Image (cartoon, grey):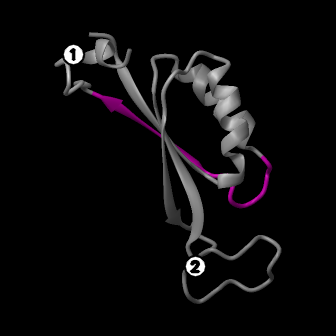
């Protein structure tokens, strides 16, 4: 079976449309988008505020899950599309997938992706 990876991206919802356009240009045909809430070490304080909040404030983010064998190309595009150089650009998580099973047909591995 071909090696599979999962790429999870947490970033601002404002980046979603540009990200989708860029990722589709390299042949990614599927992704899952979930709205999640979170914050980083700045506890939700916007970059332009001088004070750090004592309490954590959750900022809206989107998480995109992509399964693709072209990891380097996908990561390069994600980094290019999301980069602003400011707090809140996001994080990328990469993990190995041992198998994928399409429940309806019983297909496994890369067959379950297509």
Q: Vertical placement of 36 versus 44: above or below? A: above
Disc with the residue nearer the chain's start (2 vs 1): 2
Residue 18 location, quadrant: top right
Q: Label 1, secondary structure: give it.
A: loop
Indicate left or right for 113 with 66 as reference. left
What kind of element bears circle 2? loop
Q: Which dot marks residue 57?
A: 2
| Left or right of residue 98, residue 74 in this image | right
- Is 45 placed above or below 64 here? below
Q: Which residues are magenta?
A: 84-97
* Residue at the extreme bottom: 54
Q: Position of residue 79 (x, y in %)?
A: 68, 36
The residue under the point 83% across, 74% down is 48
Where is 49 relative to 8, above or below? below
Looking at the rendering, in which quadrant would you find the N terminus?
A: top left
> Residue placed farthest to the left in the image?
106
- Asked whether 94 falls inside the magenta stretch, the response is yes
Residue 90 picture location, percent across and down: 62, 52
Q: Residue at x 40, y 27 (%)?
A: 5
Distance between the alpha carbons at the discs numbered 2 and 1: 43 Å
Whether residue 2 is in magenta: the answer is: no
Question: Disc 1 marks which residue?
Answer: 107
State left or right for residue 93 relative to residue 79.
Answer: left
Q: Quadrant of the C terminus?
A: top left
* Front residue (pair 40, 23): 23
């Amino acid at each position: 079976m071909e090696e599979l990876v999962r790429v999870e991206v947490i970033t601002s919802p404002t980046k979603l449309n540009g990200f989708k356009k860029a990722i589709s240009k390299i042949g990614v045909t599927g992704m899952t988008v979930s709205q999640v809430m979170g914050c980083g070490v700045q506890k939700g304080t916007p970059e332009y505020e001088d004070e750090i909040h004592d309490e954590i404030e959750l900022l809206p983010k989107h998480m995109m899950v992509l399964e693709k064998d072209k990891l380097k190309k996908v990561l390069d595009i994600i980094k290019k599309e999301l980069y602003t150089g400011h707090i809140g650009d996001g994080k990328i998580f990469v993990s190995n997938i041992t198998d994928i099973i399409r429940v309806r047909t019983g297909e496994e591995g890369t067959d379950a992706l297509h």
